Amino acid sequence: MHYGLNSVAPMPVSPACGEPVLGIKGLRLQIGDTAILHGVDLAVHEGEAVGIVGESGSGKSMTWRAALGLLPKGASTSGEVTFAGRNILATAEHDLEGIRGRRIAAIFQDAASALNPIQRVGSQILESLRIHRSLNGAAAKAEMLRLLDQVGIVDAANRSRAYPHELSGGQNQRMAIAMALAGNPEILIADEPTTALDPTIQAQILMLLKRIQLERAMSVILISHDLGAVAALCNRVCVMYAGRIVEDAPTAELLSKPEHPYTRALIASIPPLSGERKRLQAIGGEPPDPRHMPKGCAYAPRCSSLSEECKESIPAPVCLRGSHSIRCFTATRALGLAP
């Protein structure tokens, strides 16, 4: 589903004060002989909701799997991922258990597969409470019911005794959110949390995440291919393409004044909910194969405003104004800025 960009008010921008809760610098990922990420830089501040948007294969999910050490065999990373004063990439696996799931939690697009099919959903939430907060007995049960009420589960006591296959897709996603919140995380990563749901339930889940984020002053990272969905929840958007962030800006500014040709193409492909009906503009071509990347800008083969420089060199990030940055020779030249 695509949300029209005029269907929701972008989240207000939170001032980025002090040190970020999570800082990523120069994150690179290689699987076998193939480079997947090419130096990702990103900072997430307390209470901030950051959207990561881009086509499938752009590196959105792999950025966070790499950051948290959730990678397949044969993968290698470099750079820094700083959280709570330590570099996660240099932290031993057994020490990461106190971070993953507890201080940094995640929910995924297919909640039914994330939940244990042979265990009652309430038992799974109780297990999370025991592991992450050392709660047991009546205290754990009371907290479980409070979490289920917070995520909008009706008749929580009875629903908690159900198995995942006995619940709807939306109910399973709410259960997965409750389980992620069980550790009182400082950061919640939501990786395509609405993709497998019908349009009405998608909207409900997004509004639920928005409400919980505001109530808890929690940092949220929403990973999605849908820029409209990201606009509904996030106050800042990072646009990824071929393993790099190509544009990073406050949501309202990115939607009203996108500068990168890829961001403009993404916005042009979203159907408006009002006004004149127009033919949708598809993005021509396909994202590059990570095994055969172009010599210069990765978007150059699909870009209608490229120059010879785009074909030969990779643009560095340039700050346009405030917290709005971009990787694009053409755009920065048009704005009178040196690349």
Image: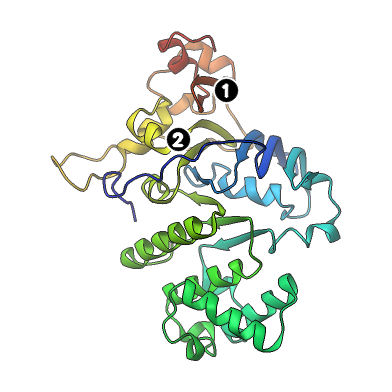
* Residue at 43% from the left image edge and 26% from the top image edge: 260
> Where does residue 63 sit, x and y in percent of width and height?
63, 45
Identity of the residue drawn at 51% across and 77% down: 148
Q: Residues within 10 Å of mark 1 (few under 14, many from 20)?
A: some
The x, y position of residue 38, in whole percent, is 66, 33
Cα distance between the residues tagged 2 and 1: 16 Å
User: Circle 1 sits on which residue?
Assistant: 317
Mark 1 belongs to which amino acid? Pro
**Quadrant of residue 141 within the rendered picture:** bottom right
Residue 109, above or below 56:
below
Q: Which mark is residue 34?
A: none
Q: Position of residue 121 (x, y in %)?
A: 57, 82
SS at badge 1: loop
Residue under label 2, please give it. 250
**Is 87 located above or below residue 147 in the figure?**
above
Label 2 or label 1, whichever comes before in sequence order: 2
